[in-house]
């Protein structure tokens, strides 16, 4: 029985791929404090290098998400350089992320802006991102919109819905076969009265309106307190509309803390909902998993390793749920037995199983310790510290 459980967990770990964000290796911060790290990545080459370090010792991170404005500032002219870096470091370009929130022109919104010239600017930028994704053979284009308003009556909410629908349809028409448009939502910040894409329902409706290649992207931190995120995941799975998931954790709002640092049971429940769906349907859920965290205080590479290892341990726990038994208890409304079946898997210590999986893959038993002993951090601090002096970090 034990060998069977190990086999089930290891098979699940084979499937788990976690995309790393380029900006997670760079200096980032909040509106209130930006703390520069001497070893932070300052170029896209350094970001690829750092991502390769994480992948080499975790075996789960073959792709790097790119932010066009930060990583490909010259647009399509930078594609060849990214391709060279991908080949050099063995990391493929992942999702392509537009930036429709940083420019001064977007103060009153991007595709939801009442000014048609600003809307055109935003749409043109995302269309460029679609072209870049096509050139890099990246499947997903993942925009997050900060659009909204701060004061009642200051914007026409219904008109802005129409602006979004019109813009997203145009963007969807530009998608190549196989590409996907992933719409991320967020209830507040920086818009505090209303946000144009504030929850999964709004993202769902906009994606359906845009076309069949548009899906919803769920960020763990982009919810109100106590919201049942796994229920949202269940709805989107049921409707075939979940396209991606951003890993992080939070205590209050979009805190961008490392995965599982606050509520590992929530992460487990989300993974369980996905794996239960896959067991019942007999097919994989096509979900792109990606880290989206702002490591202002933790070492950036160490925080990435922590997150990936935590994801592996919790994903393995979710694989240990006895789906058939749980399903029977649910049908019988055997409440305690059903809950104990779920909780029993959560309380399993899967670290030894993950270690066995790593050994089978030729990976180190302890990725964090391996990184600390590698000398890589000391080297990049020497090489990058001078460049990081005086840098103004980007917001993430």
Image: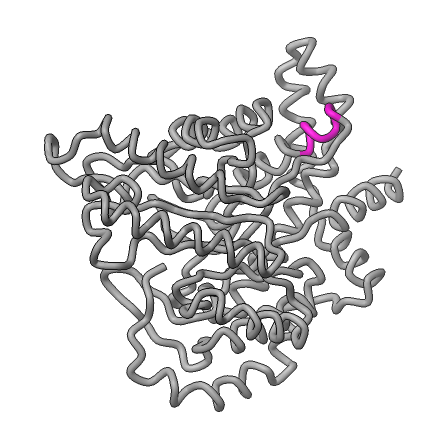
Question: Can you tell which quarter of the image residue 185 is in?
Answer: top left
Question: Can you tell which quarter of the image residue 145 is in?
Answer: top left
Q: In which quarter of the image is the C terminus?
A: bottom left
Q: Residue at x 55, y 48 (%)?
A: 140
Question: Where does residue 181 sit, x and y in percent of width and height?
Answer: 50, 42
Above or below residue 25? Residue 228 is above
Q: Residue at x 41, y 44 (%)?
A: 221
Helix, strand or loop: magenta stretch: helix
Front residue of this view, candidates 366 and 229: 229
Above or below residue 43? Residue 119 is above
Q: Residue at x 77, y 52 (%)?
A: 353
Q: Which residue is drawn at 50% across and 61% down?
A: 66
Question: Where does residue 88 sit, x and y in percent of width and height?
Answer: 66, 77
Q: In which quarter of the image is the N terminus?
A: top right
Q: Horizontal placement of 49 versus 123: left or right?
A: right
Front residue of this view, candidates 205 and 81: 81
Residue 278: in magenta span: yes
Front residue of this view, candidates 364 and 87: 87
Residue 48: in magenta span: no
Q: Give the range drawn in magenta.
A: 275-281
């Amino acid at each position: 029985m034990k060998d069977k459980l190990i086999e089930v967990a290891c098979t699940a770990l084979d499937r788990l791929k976690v995309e790393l964000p380029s900006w997670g290796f760079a200096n980032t911060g909040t509106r209130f404090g930006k703390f520069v790290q001497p070893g932070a990545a300052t170029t896209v080459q350094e970001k690829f290098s750092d991502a390769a370090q994480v992948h080499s010792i975790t075996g789960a991170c073959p792709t790097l998400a790119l932010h066009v404005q930060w990583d490909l500032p010259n647009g399509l002219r930078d594609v060849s350089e990214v391709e060279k870096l991908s080949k050099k470091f063995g990391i493929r370009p992942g999702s392509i992320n537009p930036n429709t929130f940083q420019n001064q022109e977007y103060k009153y919104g991007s595709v939801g802006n009442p000014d048609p010239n600003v809307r055109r600017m935003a749409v043109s930028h995302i269309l460029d991102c679609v072209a870049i994704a096509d050139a890099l053979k990246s499947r997903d284009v993942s925009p997050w919109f900060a659009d909204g308003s701060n004061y009642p009556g200051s914007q026409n909410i219904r008109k802005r819905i129409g602006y979004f629908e019109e813009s997203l349809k145009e963007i969807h028409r530009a998608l190549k076969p196989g590409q996907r448009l992933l719409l991320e939502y967020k209830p507040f910040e920086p818009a505090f009265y209303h946000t144009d894409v504030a929850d999964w329902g709004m993202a769902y409706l906009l994606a359906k309106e845009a076309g069949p290649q548009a899906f919803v992207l769920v960020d763990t931190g982009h919810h109100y307190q106590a919201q049942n995120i796994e229920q949202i995941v269940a709805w989107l799975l049921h409707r075939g509309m979940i396209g991606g998931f951003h890993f992080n954790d939070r205590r209050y709002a979009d805190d961008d803390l490392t995965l599982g640092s606050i509520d590992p049971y929530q992460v487990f429940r989300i993974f369980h909902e996905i794996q239960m769906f896959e067991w019942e349907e007999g097919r994989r859920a096509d979900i792109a998993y990606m880290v989206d965290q702002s490591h202002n205080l933790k070492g950036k590479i160490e925080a990435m390793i922590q997150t990936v290892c935590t994801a592996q341990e919790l994903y393995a726990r979710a694989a240990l749920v006895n789906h058939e038994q749980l399903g029977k208890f649910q049908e019988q409304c055997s409440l305690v037995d059903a809950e104990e079946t779920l909780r029993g898997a959560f309380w399993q210590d899967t670290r030894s199983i993950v270690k066995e999986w790593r050994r089978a893959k030729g990976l180190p038993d302890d990725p964090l310790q391996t990184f600390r002993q590698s000398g890589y951090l000391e080297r990049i601090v020497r090489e990058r510290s001078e460049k990081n002096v005086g840098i103004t970090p980007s917001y993430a």
